[in-house]
Image (cartoon, rainbow, N blue to C red):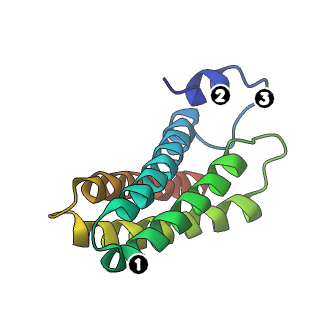
Amino acid sequence: MSYAKPLLDTYPRTFNVDAGVLAGTIDALNDCAQACTADADDDLSEQNVTEMVKCIRLCLDCADVCTATVRVTSRQTDYDASVSKPLLEACVATCKSCGDECERHAQHHEHCRVCAEACRRCEQACRELLAAMR
């Protein structure tokens, strides 16, 4: 169960963006960070790890960027778009790169297919939140 929406529903002030879009992005960021962390670990279990190095690196980068982004976007008090927007833009770029790399391996590694899906969902959610912020 996600706590993003119930917590946003209890927020005592008004939001600068639609709470549903924000909650969806928070959920997608958390899911992507978890999927990327798990995929990197799964990649390390593969017989030919050297073929997976780029995927591992991008998954770890994506998990870190998503984690930082979700922490900042979850804080709405005295919101500062000059901080949130660059993080969301970095998340879009990182999720795209990671998703592209995971898709290269998806035919042979189911964990990469699942991770690519999480990356695509997160990339789209971050784009939607960025659009809602304009």
Evaluate whether residue 133 shows in this view: yes
x, y percent for residue 114:
29, 51
Examine the rendered structure and indicate whether residue 92 appears above or below residue 22. Answer: below
Residue 125 makes an appearance in the image: no
Q: Residues within 10 Å of mark 3 (few under 14, many from 20)?
A: few
* Residue type, numbered disc 2: Leu
Which label number is shown at residue 8?
2
123 in relation to 70, above or below: below
User: Residue 56, how many percent across, how many down?
Assistant: 44, 69
Tell me the residue that label 1 is attached to.
54
User: Residue furthest toward the right?
Assistant: 78
Relative to 9, is 49 on the left or the right?
left
Q: Are marks 3 and 2 in contact (CB under 8 Å)?
A: no
Depth order, front residue of 28/107: 107
Label annotation for residue 13: 3
Q: Residue furthest front?
A: 47
Residue 50, picture quadrant: bottom left
Of labels 2 and 1, the one closer to you? 1
